[in-house]
Amino acid sequence: MTMLIPPPLSLYVHLPWCVRKCPYCDFNSHEGKGALPFEDYVDALIRDLDQDLPLVWGRSIHSVFFGGGTPSLFPAEAIDRFLQAASSRLRFAPDCEITLETNPGTTEHGRFDRYRAAGVNRISFGIQSFDDACLKRLGRIHDSGEAERAVKLAQDAGYDNLNLDLMYALPGQTLAMAEHDLQRAFELQPAHISHYQLTLEPNTVFFARPPQGIPDQDNAWDMQERCQALLAAAGYGHYEVSAYARPGRQCAHNLNYWRFGDYLGVGAGAHGKLTLGAEQAVLRRWKIKHPAQYLAHAGSAAAIGGDERIAPQRLPFEYLLNSLRLHEGFALADFQARTGLELASLQPGLQQALERGWLVSDGALVRPTELGRRFTNDVISLFLDS
Ligand SMILES: C[S@@+](CC[C@H](N)C(=O)[O-])C[C@H]1O[C@@H](n2cnc3c(N)ncnc32)[C@H](O)[C@@H]1O
Ligand code: SF4
């Protein structure tokens, strides 16, 4: 074994409520009924963070991500109170990226100024499509006009680091419609675009009753290829399976996940991954999922859904599951530092992947080829029994 060296640390904060549950969504998100307990939830998040602090003493936070659910349901004052509490407990790096996920149907005038004053410096919008009929079929609470207005409100408040989430292969969507969605997105000049293929996730309404008109795999593939070309031509570099960014505007928070960095996870159902230097182990910790139970137990042992030390023989697989999502791949030295394993543990999987033309290496860096990116699951499975 070589030494595990703690990588950069991020903070994920889960805010679990939405106005309405979308029929395709399997996130830990719950339709908020009546007045939501924002203040109590922030108190719970702070207790939760206090409980995890001994796992990260002395380390700095490099990014924060408020994910959901719909974090933009929370008033800026609640976000501000949490960030103040967090930054008084943990050192925030000077260039700390702080992202808030936003549903365009929940924004109101003035809110973005206050999120900005609270320290949020990046907004991620769940746009999904600019086609009103598609939005309706997806059960979204906003139309395309509202989405555009919300983005412009954020820009007026001084935000230039914006992400737009779009989905493709939507029910009733043609290739031309998918292209048109991207053109509308480009007009808003976001720094980052996430472009996801709609998937039918178990335990969703769409899984139980698939909507009519979902493009077949061939059509979805055509959409992906054509949209990738449009994104490239518009200056968005493809750096991860579904992520595209203007130069220098990759999402620092997600990059840290994909590089097998560490993260604290606070909030209902939040997951964390932490390198324990003294123990020379990698810990996964997750919190209980249901908001009411989380509110009742946050900060106590009953709020910990589970603690798992990743078995060393599984670390190569887990490392590659993340790092091979990235076009840049990974450095062999980072693999050693973040898994505590010798390079020999990557063989013979690495050798086979190189021979099949799925990966290339210069002896220091390893990255997936275009062929490898097409067969990511096959590539990663080579490392299951390393
Ligand atoms: C937590 S949501 C984002 C913020 C906010 N809740 C919203 O929907 O506006 C994260 C993103 O994941 C994507 N997503 C959710 N479910 C998906 C699915 N079944 N297939 C593909 N993408 C999905 C959507 O683009 C969504 O914006
Ligand atoms: S608003 Fe976002 S998190 Fe909420 S149900 Fe819809 S997709 Fe899921």
Image: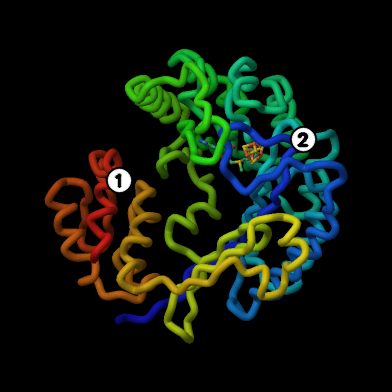
Q: What x and y, as percent, mark residue 148?
A: 69, 25
Earlier in the chain: of badge 2 and badge 1, it is: 2
Quarter of the image for the N terminus: give it: bottom left
Q: What x and y, as percent, mark residue 218?
A: 32, 22
In this view, 113 is above or below 60: above
Q: Say what secondary structure mark 1 lies in.
A: helix
Q: Which mark is residue 128?
A: none
User: Residue visible at 56% across and 37% down?
Assistant: 204
- State how far apart marks 2 and 1 are (Cα): 36 Å
Q: Say what secondary structure mark 2 lies in.
A: helix
In front of the other: 140 or 118 = 140
Q: Which residue is mark 2?
A: 106
Tell me which amino acid carries mark 1. Thr
Q: Residue furthest bottom?
A: 278
User: Residue visible at 60% across and 25% down?
Assistant: 138
The quadrant where residue 187 appears:
top right
In this view, 91 is above or below 110: below
Quarter of the image for the C terminus: give it: bottom left
Tell me which amino acid carries mark 2. Thr
In this view, 115 is above or below 265: above
Answer few, some or many: residues within 10 Å of disc 1's Cα (few below 14, many 20 plus, some between 14 and 19): some
Quarter, ligand 2:
top right
Q: What x and y, as percent, mark residue 351?
A: 15, 59
Q: Which residue is mark 1?
A: 376
Q: Is residue 286 left or right of residue 297?
A: left
User: Residue visible at 49% across and 79% down?
Assistant: 276
Q: Residue furthest front?
A: 208
User: Residue visible at 65% across and 76% down?
Assistant: 53
The answer as to whether callout 1 falls within 8 Å of ligand 1 is no
Residue 95 visible in this rendered orientation of the protein = no
